[in-house]
Image: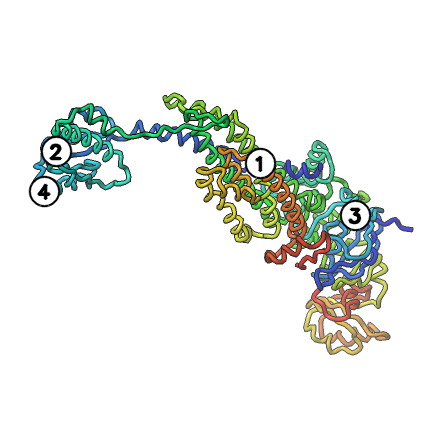
């Protein structure tokens, strides 16, 4: 045990000294902070979009114009004195769009009251539809008012006719009562996705540290020196423990910074904290299971990657063998959306019982949340799989670390795993 | 009876169909310098790895420092493998201390000893430097110090001289003699016979997994017929034309000749004197190389 601890200690200290550790620590708060700050800043600094209107109806623009200053900060009407029916006018405006004097321009059809025919929106950027939607609503409002007036319909009647049927979302609680949907429910619904993504990044990058580390020790030729003092199993256990400490340090920093940022950044930006995230701290289904699933997921993939690391002599070889595992890891990402929509559906239930996916899928289902027996059964299955994976990894590690030359074929690795300890014929160098 | 640091009894190890070590038996007396000699692939490394319980024998027994189970005394052994390296990003004192801690020293004790050792062996300035900044010779020295920090009773060095320049070879020899003076048993392997000849009290000759001979160096050397060493200038082809010479090791400027039984050195000298310039003519015990070639019975690339 003492030796395992010594190995773990060294592993942890060495990782803490690397740049990538500190990048790992700061990247998440940085991204989170920026994702809050940047849109706010962008919104503040956004240049007002200039636009022009060719009014072929002759009255709509004049009717709308008094309403324009309300949104003047975002969209600014550029007055162009062009004859709307002159073919040259469009050409002239196209040029202005190209020269970026205006962002876009509208053509209003000759008789919008009769039909919208001939109305156009012209721009270089068709993905940003804010301007089109805003101006469209404004014009529609005025045109509808004219139509109602023309048909001599009572305004109140018109409004009543146009009022849509809206379904108010209500949530059926555990007690069997209907309840209003709160912001908290929204968080409950979507927070698991964020956690799954974080979990995925954490498991993937941190178990990969173990892989690079093991390959490095092999290519550095230090492994045999170590084996003269510790047994292969002690070495492997030490490495896995050391990197687990590194990983826990990183996610602890993430969780800590998450609270700090949620609390302070919106206020710093001048906006009050509108969303209450305290749900995430209160309900163990999030943070506790996040840490637990990180550890379990890490152990499972660590066992695989330490085995791969042990049989490879260069990172390139290791990356080739990593391929199938990467593909395996991507599946829970693909399943993320469907599971979020239906956390207790059959896809979610099925994937929960496949050990490599269990941590991600169960985290994903936190909104459900899954029944207690599912937690117990999937976790038990996962722990058994981890035990088997570690046992197999130890056998591969024991033989692999002393191998030089070409990495073994999968069939050879399987033979090592199946043979009893000490009887496997290592290829000679 | 001599007290033995290591005893091997009919130890065998195979890798698949390949017998790397074939029924090797030997005994290493305490406090001696013991050389494992043989060409590349002879089974030296495999044998040493079994002593270090990095590999396990298929058959036979290994007794290290009086224990049947070598793992029980792992912390009293020091091992320098042939393939060795250091963590590039660790400082020299840190890595030497780490090796000590892995052998069971307390953190404090390991740190203190690491600094002492590095200072004592002239690496004091490098204590706080990272290993990646060391030259190859210094790296080797740091590695050997790493095997000494826990004051092992038995030190095993696998090819400690390979790839070193003469100055660094001297450094390593110095370290080995230092260990002997402190009463430690040292086993080292090499395929360079000359080094073993200078250092060893005992040797083991091994080829293709089999023991060829072992024993005290003096006994091994006096065992066979004496040889003649000739330092010369001229065409070495003349040796081939000489009668009654059973073997020739010609290195261009120096040749070692073994005579057939009953042949006289006088006759040999007479036959050579007009054909090449002789700078030295000497009869003496055969070199280890010669002994090895005789024992293996034929040409080797050793």
Mark 4 or mark 1: whose residue is earlier in sequence: 4
Which quadrant is the C terminus of chain B positioned in? Answer: bottom right
**Residue assigned mark 1:** A375
Chain to which the residue tagged by mark 4 belongs: A
Q: CA distance from mark 1 to mark 2?
A: 67 Å
**Residue assigned mark 4:** A88
* Depth check, front residue: B118 or B241: B118
Chain to which the residue tagged by mark 3 belongs: B
The residue mark sitting in front, 4 or 1, is: 1
Residue A170 is situated, as x and y percent measured from the top left of the image, at 41, 28
Q: Residue A252's image quarter?
A: top right
**Which secondary structure lies at badge 2?**
loop
Residue A253 is situated, as x and y percent measured from the top left of the image, at 52, 30
Q: Are marks 4 and 2 on the same chain?
A: yes
Dot 2 crowding, Cα within 10 Å, few <14, some 14–19, many 20+: few
**Residue assigned mark 3:** B70
Mark 1 or mark 2: whose residue is earlier in sequence: 2
**In the displayed structure, would residue A285 be above or below residue B103?**
above
Q: Is the Cβ of the residue at disc 4 closer than 8 Å to that at disc 1?
A: no
Image check: B221 left or right of A249? right
């Amino acid at each position: 045990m003492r030796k395992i601890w010594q190995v773990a200690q060294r592993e942890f200290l060495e990782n803490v000294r690397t740049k990538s550790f500190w990048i790992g620590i700061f990247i998440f708060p940085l991204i989170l902070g920026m994702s809050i700050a940047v849109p706010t800043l962008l919104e503040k600094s956004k240049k007002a979009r200039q636009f022009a209107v060719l009014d072929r109806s002759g009255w709509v623009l004049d009717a709308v114009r008094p309403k324009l200053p309300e949104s003047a900060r975002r969209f600014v009407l550029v007055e162009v004195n062009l004859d709307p029916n002159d073919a040259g006018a469009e050409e002239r405006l196209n040029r202005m769009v190209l020269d970026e004097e205006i962002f876009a321009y509208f053509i209003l059809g000759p008789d919008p009251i009769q039909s919208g025919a001939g109305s156009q929106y012209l721009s270089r950027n068709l993905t940003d539809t804010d301007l089109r939607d805003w101006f469209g609503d404004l014009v529609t409002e005025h045109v509808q008012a004219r139509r109602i007036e023309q048909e001599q319909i009572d305004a109140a009647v018109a409004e009543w006719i146009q009022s849509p049927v809206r379904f108010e979302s209500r949530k059926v609680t555990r007690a069997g009562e209907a309840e209003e949907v709160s912001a908290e429910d929204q968080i409950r619904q979507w927070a698991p996705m964020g956690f799954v993504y974080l979990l995925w990044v954490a498991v993937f990058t941190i178990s990969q540290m173990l892989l690079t580390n093991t390959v490095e020790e092999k290519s550095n030729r230090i492994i045999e020196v170590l084996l003269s003092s510790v047994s292969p199993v002690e070495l492997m256990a030490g490495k896995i423990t050391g990197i687990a400490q590194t990983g826990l340090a990183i996610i602890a920093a993430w969780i800590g910074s998450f609270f700090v940022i949620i609390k302070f950044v919106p206020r710093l930006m001048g906006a009050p904290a509108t969303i209450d995230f305290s749900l995430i701290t209160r309900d163990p289904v999030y943070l506790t299971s996040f840490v637990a699933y990180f550890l379990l997921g890490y152990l499972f993939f660590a066992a695989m990657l330490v085995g791969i690391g042990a049989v490879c002599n260069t990172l390139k070889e290791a990356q080739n063998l990593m391929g199938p595992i990467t593909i395996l890891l991507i599946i829970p990402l693909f399943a993320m959306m469907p599971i979020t929509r239906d956390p207790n559906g059959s896809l979610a239930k099925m994937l929960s019982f496949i050990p490599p996916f269990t941590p991600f899928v169960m985290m994903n289902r936190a909104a459900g949340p899954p029944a207690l027996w599912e937690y117990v059964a999937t976790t038990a299955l996962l722990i058994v799989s981890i035990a088997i994976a570690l046992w197999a990894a130890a056998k591969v590690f024991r033989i692999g670390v002393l191998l030089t030359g070409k990495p073994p074929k999968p069939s050879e690795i399987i033979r090592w795993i199946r043979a009893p300890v000490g009887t496997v014929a290592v290829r000679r160098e | 009876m001599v007290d033995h640091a290591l005893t091997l009894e009919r130890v065998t190890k195979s890798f698949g169909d390949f017998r790397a070590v074939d029924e090797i038996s030997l005994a290493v007396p305490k406090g001696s310098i013991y050389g494992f000699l043989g060409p590349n692939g002879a089974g030296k490394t495999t044998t040493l790895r079994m002593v270090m319980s990095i590999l396990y024998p298929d058959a036979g027994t290994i007794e290290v420092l009086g224990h049947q189970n070598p793992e029980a005394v792992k912390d009293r052994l020091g091992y320098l493998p042939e393939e060795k390296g250091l963590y590039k990003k660790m400082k020299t004192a840190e890595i030497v201390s780490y090796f000590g801690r892995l052998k069971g020293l307390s953190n404090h004790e390991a740190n203190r000893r690491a600094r002492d050792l590095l200072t004592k062996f002239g690496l004091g300035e490098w204590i706080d430097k990272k290993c990646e900044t060391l030259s190859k010779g210094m790296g080797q020295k740091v590695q050997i110090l790493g095997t000494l920090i826990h004051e092992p009773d038995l030190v095993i060095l696998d090819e400690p001289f390979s790839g070193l320049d003469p100055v660094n070879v001297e450094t390593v020899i110095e370290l080995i003699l230092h260990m002997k003076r402190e009463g430690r048993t040292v086993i080292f392997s090499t395929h360079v016979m000359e080094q073993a000849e200078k250092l060893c009290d005992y040797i083991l000759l091994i080829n293709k997994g089999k023991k060829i001979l072992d024993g005290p160096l003096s006994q091994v050397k006096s065992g066979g017929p004496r040889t003649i060493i000739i330092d010369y200038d001229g065409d070495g082809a003349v040796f081939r034309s000489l009668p009654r010479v059973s073997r020739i090791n010609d290195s261009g400027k120096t040749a070692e000749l073994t005579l057939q039984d009953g042949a006289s050195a006088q006759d040999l000298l007479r036959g050579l004197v007009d054909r090449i310039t002789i700078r030295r003519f000497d009869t003496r015990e055969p070199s280890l190389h010669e002994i090895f070639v005789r024992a293996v019975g034929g040409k080797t690339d050793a």
